[in-house]
Amino acid sequence: MAKPAVEFVADGNNLYLIYRPMDDDSWVHDRFARGVPLDIKGTFHLTVADLAKSQTKRNLDDFSEEEREVRFVVATAKGKYFVFKPAIVEVTVPVLVARDAAPTWKWFSAESKVSVLKLLADLRPSRIVIGGEAPDAIPITEYERLVAQFPTRYELKRYVQSRLSVVFRELSDAKVDAETTLRKYVAKRVTAKAQDLIQPFREQEVSKYEFLHMKLTTMLVDAEGYSELQWQDQILDIVRLLYPKYIAAFTSASIKDTTTGGRRQIDILLVDANGNIDVIEIKKPFEAKIVTETTYRDNHVPHRELAGTVTQVEKYLFHLNRWGTAGEETLTKRYQDKLPTGLNIRIVNPCGLIIMGRDNDLTERQRADFEIFRRQNKNLVDVITYDDLLRRLERMLSQLKAGR
């Protein structure tokens, strides 16, 4: 089997680059004699000073054709790593390779004589460490996967075509969508995996949701032991942990009744990270079912408490929308010391959220009629039962514990 044109060999405290020209190597030595350096694959800048001692003085007649190769010292040992000579790789950061690694030229040179090391150094790391046990070392398998992502000549050709095709297809009857072809090709080549951002917090998240599930279950068993205000405060905390979009909640929020000119008082006003507001009503669970047990024209209709609360929230939303810019200014001024600096409250199609009732004891027909009622009002008011909250907590726990 033919030997590669460029090969790395570790021997003692040195890492050698062995270069085997296609013909003989006399032209390399002639080049050095004239003081001209040798560039290999656009990555390694070599001079006569880098030649191994055994080759600084050599008579070509003493070597057979197969032995005609040029050996350079490109890195020296320091601890468990070989450290490349900066002048050879021409990068401004240290480059280290583990002494037990087996590097190939593909680790350092991409197609079209592009230096991988120079491109990585342009990203300004403190150093580039390949393999070994150093804290900042890139595992060899990951480094090889990274190098494999460098574009091929085919990919570069497709990239140029995609840039041209955007305009050319509008000016001609060209049928090939080069941009789509490029995307499909790149998607097949890219093997990088997204970092699992959840994993470091998974244990804490499981503990949080287990606590919330236990707390809500306990509260539902002893609902009568809480006042209406205490119940609202506790459920509001659970809701905000389940729906982290909301950064603030204001109770007993007074708004203008745009019909009579008087005032109305919203139980709880929610504010999200963009300053948009929503309205939430939290009611203690009642013994009666959330829809009637009897039917009206063959339908289980909403319990009076539920229908009344939906109407109440819809009126709040009606007045908020009519209050408009004046309302935004009033609410922002009122709550500015309780909001992040510079955040203004915005009234842009606010939605309502109602938490009340249980659905664990509904029949299939009752459940179906309740779902129809919920979805009819969902564009304005979302109705959530306490069993919905329990199911949400249980399913989030199931996903987290399964590592999904």
Image: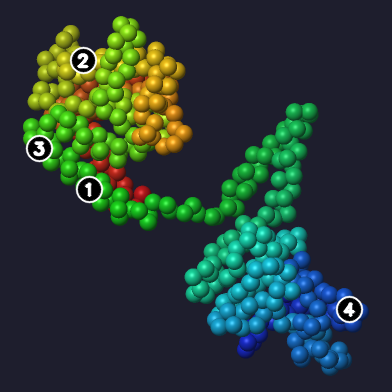
Query: Which comes sooner in the sequence, label 3 or label 4?
Result: 4
Marks 4/2: CA distance?
Answer: 94 Å
* SS at circle 3: helix
Measured from the top left, where is residue 258 in percent x and y?
35, 10
Query: Which comes sooner in the sequence, label 1 or label 2?
Result: 1
Q: Label 4, on which residue? A: 35
Looking at the rendered structure, the kind of residue marked 2 is Gly
Marks 1/2: CA distance?
Answer: 33 Å
Marks 2/3: CA distance?
Answer: 25 Å
Measured from the top left, where is residue 232 in percent x and y?
20, 31
Q: Label 3, on which residue? A: 221
Q: Give the colouring mode of the picture.
A: rainbow
Let me know if residue 369 appears in the view: no
Which residue lies at the image location 78% right of the left edge and 28% below the top edge?
A: 171
Q: Is residue 140 left or right of residue 246?
A: right
Measured from the top left, where is residue 359 in percent x and y?
17, 28
Number of other residues with Cα within 10 Å of mark 2, as a class: few under 14, some 14 to 19, many 20 or more: few
Image quarter for residue 327?
top left
Looking at the rendered structure, the kind of residue marked 3 is Val
* SS at circle 2: helix
Q: Is residue 235 left or right of residue 89?
A: left
Looking at the rendered structure, the kind of residue marked 4 is Gly
Looking at the rendered structure, the kind of residue marked 1 is Glu
Quarter holding the N terminus is: bottom right
Number of other residues with Cα within 10 Å of mark 4, as a class: few under 14, some 14 to 19, many 20 or more: few
Q: Label 1, on which residue? A: 210
Instruction: Work out whether residue 49 or residue 375 is closer to the camera in this orientation and state it.
Output: 49
Query: Which comes sooner in the sequence, label 1 or label 4?
Result: 4
Query: Which comes sooner in the sequence, label 2 or label 3?
Result: 3
Question: Is residue 52 depicted above or below 300 in this figure?
Answer: below
* Mark seen at residue 308: 2
